[in-house]
Amino acid sequence: KIFECHMKEVPHEFTEAEWTRLLVSTADFSGSDIATLCHEALRAGIDVIAVATHFRCSRADRPDIATPVPEQGWLEPCDADSPGAVPTTLDDMTAEEVKRVVPPLPTMEDLLTRVDSEK
């Protein structure tokens, strides 16, 4: 439940099996360790944006963002070979474009990678 507490505001599609795997992997972690782990996993999306070289437009609703989808859509980081990928970086964007940038949602892999680095 402690992970759910720290991740409750973050949309994700973690399965019960993934939660169980995470709990087993962090059995010796303190509450503070788990809070730090969750915080770092959430920052992973920001780190992805900072180094992204391609973005694509998305008109999908994001339950983690209270703002309605902008008329031009969100800009999300992506791989160069993703459909709709446009080569650009944050430094190349206008201020209006930067306001439309959204981080990728955290994955279980984001959490598990950090668990491995903490051990």
Image (spheres, helix red, strand yellow):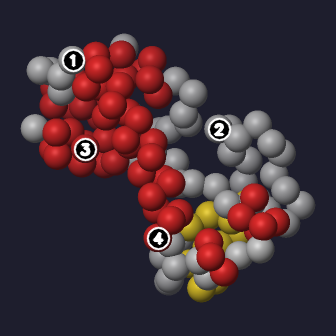
Q: Is residue 117 left or right of residue 63?
A: left
**Amino acid beneath label 1:** Ser
Location of mark 2 (residue): 64
Location of mark 4 (residue): 51
The image shows residue 18 at horizontal and vertical percentages of 30, 34
Q: Are marks 3 and 4 in contact (CB under 8 Å)?
A: no
Location of mark 1 (residue): 30
Give the Cα separation between the discs numbered 1 and 4. Answer: 31 Å
Q: Are marks 3 and 1 in contact (CB under 8 Å)?
A: no
In this view, 63 is above or below 23: below
Q: Is residue 38 left or right of residue 62?
A: left
**Amino acid beneath label 2:** Asp
Name the quarter where the N terminus is drawn. Answer: top left
Q: In the rendered structure, which disc, 1 or 4, sits on the residue that comes first in sequence?
A: 1
Give the Cα separation between the discs numbered 2 and 1. Answer: 27 Å
Image depth: mark 3 or mark 4 in front: 4
Give the Cα separation between the discs numbered 3 and 1. Answer: 15 Å
The image shows residue 101 at horizontal and vertical percentages of 67, 60
**Amino acid beneath label 3:** Arg
